[in-house]
Image (cartoon, helix red, strand yellow):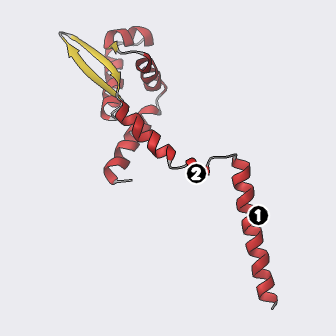
Amino acid sequence: MLTRDAKKLDQALAALANKRRREIVNTLGKQPASIGQLADQQHSSLPAIHRHIKVLERANLVQRKKSGRVNFLAVDRTGLLLIQSWIAQYHAYWGSNSETLENYIDTIGKNRNQLAKLRKK
């Protein structure tokens, strides 16, 4: 992953580490909303929602469009796609954790046995 992409990934994951911001992304994933609507739904003040939105915008997780005096927000797929592609690189390893660990232990055990046999010769 490129350094720039790594920094963006760090920003996206850090932004989503906060429960309130995950709730905002979840809400906006269902439909766009104004900042005022989000504040009402989240039972939060406008300044608090603005702070969360700024973090989400820097992480490319939310985009803003202004219409008159109202700011409307929607999910920005750029940040989500970056996270998705990072997770997808581990797809080859998906299976049960115990299977993966058991296979690793079996492989190490076989290698140790082979080494022991070679040393005896």
Across and down, in percent, residue 110 comes to 77, 71
Which disc number belongs to residue 31? none
Q: How many marks?
A: 2
Residue at the (43%, 25%) spot, across then down: 21
Q: Which mark lies nearer to you, 2 or 1? A: 2
Across and down, in percent, residue 68 comes to 17, 9
* Of 15 and 86, the residue lying toward us: 86
Say which quarter of the image contains residue 117: bottom right
Which residue type carries mark 1?
Answer: Asp
Mark 1, other Cα within 10 Å: few <14 / some 14–19 / many ≥20: few
Which residue lies under the disc numbered 1? 106
Residue at the (30%, 27%) spot, across then down: 54
Mark 2, other Cα within 10 Å: few <14 / some 14–19 / many ≥20: few
Say which quarter of the image contains residue 30: top left
Q: Is residue 49 above or below residue 92?
A: above
Which residue lies under the disc numbered 2? 92
Which residue type carries mark 2?
Answer: Ala
The CA distance from mark 2 to mark 1 is: 19 Å
Taking the image as shown, residue 78 lies to the left or right of residue 109, namely left
Q: Is residue 30 above or below residue 90?
A: above
Across and down, in percent, residue 99 comes to 73, 51
Q: Is residue 39 above or below residue 22?
A: above
Taking the image as shown, residue 1 lies to the left or right of residue 17, namely left
Give the structural element (helix, strand or loop) at label 1: helix
Marks 2 & 1, CB-CB < 8 Å contact? no
Say which quarter of the image contains residue 38: top left
Residue at the (32%, 12%) spot, across then down: 34
* Of 88 and 18, the residue lying toward us: 88
Residue placed furthest toward the front: 92
Give the structural element (helix, strand or loop) at label 2: helix
Across and down, in percent, residue 93 comes to 61, 51
